[in-house]
Amino acid sequence: MTPTDTAGLRTASVTYRGRILSPADAGWNDWPDGRLVVRGGKVAQVGPWRRGARADVDLRPHFVLPGLVDVHAHVPQLPVCGVHPGSLLEWLNRWTFPLERRFRGARARELTRVYFREMLAQGTTSAALYTSAWPDSVEACFEEAAALNLHAWIGPPLMDVDAYRPVTTRRVLDEARALARLDSPERRFVVTPRFALSATRELLEGCAALARERGLPIQTHLAEQRAECDAVRERFGQDYLDVYDEAGLLTPRTLFAHSIWLSAREWQRLARAGCAVAHCPTSNVFLGSGVMNWKRARQVRVGLGSDVGAGPDLSMFRVARMAWTLQSLNGDPADAGELLWAATLGGARALGFSGVGALAPGSSADFIVLDAEQIVPPGAPQAESTEDLLSRILHRAGRSAVRQVYVAGVLRHQR
């Protein structure tokens, strides 16, 4: 039996040996000679290698980490990565909305498969995803995620203002209510008002009511650019966060992407409400949006997002590096362990998933294998500590370093 034998893995036990690193409540576990036992798609045991044990799969000298978690990305936008940076609203109207308008039917099914293949190749095994506004694009995304056994949030951008298809507020909410049938513990249907400028108050309030009635999570954008914040204030006569608060969208199940132009008091309000935040630094640089306040974001649950397609690709290592760069230049540096924690366990907690983001007994056996020579090249000084190794992973890892990706114990990508 091999790690790709999905039928056999339902009952078989497979033991892996390698250097295993996994986030924990306080920092990182590091087993230089580690043992990972997978049974029925879940982690049965993890820890130091036991004398006399037998490895079914010997991964030495390579590094084993939990699969990465991307808490904010747009499936239809993968083809527009790197295309013509500009202001957010111009970029959306000129490039993104026309692309999403065509993301339906056979095109949506094929490009969704392409998206998930690339996501896995980058080492990401869980994500919060926006589809297009067409219901069949949502169904295609759920089907592909289920086929791969991925944990995900999936939802269509709900829009009744400047929408790229003929809609009414009632139709948008009725479609969302019908799609909520797809919700499950592993693949959540997420209520997704795109952002305040794409919605009437009626739609925002309807989104909050649907999420409340069905116990569904919520994802949307918040305070990404100053011009966007000004436009929200002009339309609604309120600050951005007040608009969402009045609609009932500040909940412990809500994830706000970007959250750049917020005051200290607004961060406190997010913390009191139990909200989570998606930090998307590569996207923020591409569109010239600004720098999120990492120090204040520590008050809430925070994960990292690629925000493809304003982000240049689906590499969460690139996202974490950009976060490190921006925070260092901003005078509030975050260390490598903290940022990789946000890209794994922190992201899982932002999404409310208890079984991903770390390698622990009972968790889904989602893990990646990083090429040791790409992290510590031949001739380089060997890593002297866990912190040293995490720093090298942060600054050197990328798509080419990802040798293998396992989801629920099944090998889904091999370089």
Image (spheres, grey):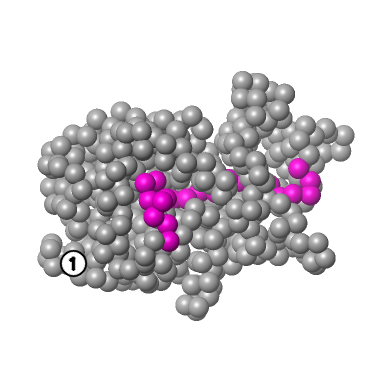
Q: Quadrant of the N terminus?
A: top right
Q: Residues within 10 Å of mark 1 (few under 14, many from 20)?
A: some
Q: Which residue is mark 1?
A: 231
Q: Position of residue 159 (x, y in %)?
A: 20, 48
Q: Which sits in the foreground, 414 or 266?
A: 414
174 left or right of 82 in image: left
Kindly identify the amino acid type of the residue bearing the numbered disc 1: Ala
**Would residue 225 appear left or right of 357 to someone viewing this image?**
left
Looking at the image, can residue 163 be seen?
yes
Residue 209 in the image: x percent, y percent? 20, 41
Residue 37 horizontal side relative to residue 53, left or right: left
- Residue 178 placement: quadrant: top left
Q: Which residues are magenta?
A: 59-82
Residue occupying image coordinates x 19% and y 38%: 173
User: Is 267 part of what is drawn in magenta?
Assistant: no
Whether 97 is drawn above or below 82: the answer is: above
Q: Quadrant of the C terminus?
A: top right
Is 216 rendered above or below residue 275? above
